[in-house]
Image: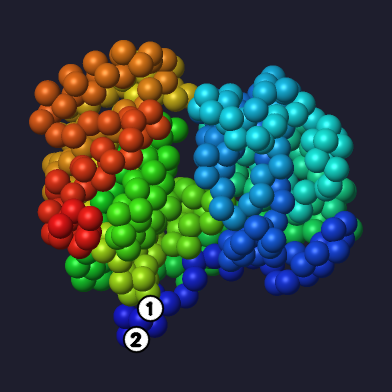
Amino acid sequence: MSVNTLYSDPYFSVFPNERIHPNTQRGLLNAYHCCGSETTPSAVIFCEANFTKTDGKTANGLIRYSPKFRILSVIDSEKAGLDSGYALDGEYNGIPIYATLTESIEMAREIPEYFIFGIAPSSGVLSTLDRQVILEAIDLGMNIVNGLHEYLNDDPEFIAASRKAGVVILDIRKPRAKRNLQIFSGIVNHVDCPKVVIMGTDCAIGKRTTATKLVSALRQYGLNVVLVATGQTGVIQGAPYSLVMDSIPAQFCPGELEAVIYRAYEVEKPDIIIIEGQGALSHPAFSTSSMIIRGSAPNAVILQHAPCRKYRVDFDEMAMPSVASEIELIELFAHAKVIGISINHEGMEEKEIDECIYHYSKEFAIPVTDALKRSSKFLVHMVLRAFPKLAKQIPILQ
């Protein structure tokens, strides 16, 4: 069997064929292939009591970047009345936060085509309230985007409700059948463009945000860049090359990631590939970080760290690692250098951010920035400093 045959099939096969939405009478578009403002499907994000928090990372990510959905509002009764952009990053985006689904629909004067479950709880399962709201959305004719480990298409109550309403439930984390999964073969070593992984010292720390910012900035410089997303939020955002690593059996994780990376390389002929990391290599509760390194065989790593975070998210007795120890572990395991640090400014004032950037840059002798608070040019500098050949491909730098 040829390499192209091995790595040509798309990862997900859960998306619906074209159908008519029961309320809007518009085509039920595959949200991950549509483009343009006239065809982008509308959506509401449910993030009750968790928007701007770590467990609301799916909603947070979609508010910052959502090219495949026209987000009408966020549902979170604790922050109702606020602008979601201002609540999240201090910048208005015109997407309001409402207390209930009913209020969201009344204010929008339309029923959204999609209801996105925007919470990523550590339990990975729905609460009683969550189930009630999702069933309400289904009854109203909304298609459901679910990123949890709990697959709604396996639940008799949701199956019956969706069939009655004529809507589709997308279980984003549901992988392909095991018979179609691939083990690692080493073909990723034939990818001859730089591969950079965004690792972190904890989960829900900003790896995907930094990866998205970096990709956007490199593209603005004229480089052909591919982002490989490895979590449910990246898939929902519409990353063409993506998979959800923590839902794949461990034996196949490196091989499945390798397959996605190689397919992106063959199809896109990129100048550079950026890979989203998950968890932390030092975190004993998560193993996907090690599999991401094995499956991607990175040429370099950018480390994401929250200086004011004392304990791991959802692990109150597990102290955060130091930047130095994480860098040492990553470089030993990955056989690749950490080329830069991006800090998460949670709990920090502007002066503290500046001091932290200065301190880390002096201590580790590598570029340091804050992907959200500082210019993306600093992220680009990390990459061009590590791979000077890329700079020669940028006309404005010549």
Question: On residue 1, which mark appears?
Answer: 2
Residue at horizontal 53%, vertical 28%? Answer: 91
Looking at the image, which is closer to me, 367 or 257? 367
Specify which label sits upstream in the sequence, 2 or 1: 2
Mark 2: secondary structure: loop
Residue at horizontal 65%, vertical 35%? Answer: 94
Residue extending furthest toward the bottom: 1
Q: Is residue 144 visible?
A: no
Above or below, comparing residue 158 to residue 52 in the picture = below
Mark 1: secondary structure: helix
Residue 95 locus on image (x, y percent): 66, 36
Residue 59 locus on image (x, y percent): 59, 37
**In the rendered picture of this protein, how many numbered marks are placed on residues?**
2
The amino acid marked with disc number 2 is: Met
Image side of residue 341 versus residue 314, left or right: left
Q: Which residue is mark 1?
A: 6
Above or below, comparing residue 165 to residue 329 in the picture = below
Above or below, comparing residue 138 to residue 126 in the picture = below
Q: CA distance from mark 2 to mark 1?
A: 7 Å
- Contact between marks 2 and 1 (CB within 8 A): the answer is yes
Looking at the image, which is closer to me, 40 or 231? 40
Report the quarter where the C terminus lies: bottom left
Residue 221 locus on image (x, y percent): 30, 54
Q: Is residue 359 visible?
A: yes
Image side of residue 265 versus residue 80, left or right: left
Looking at the image, which is closer to me, 343 or 126? 343
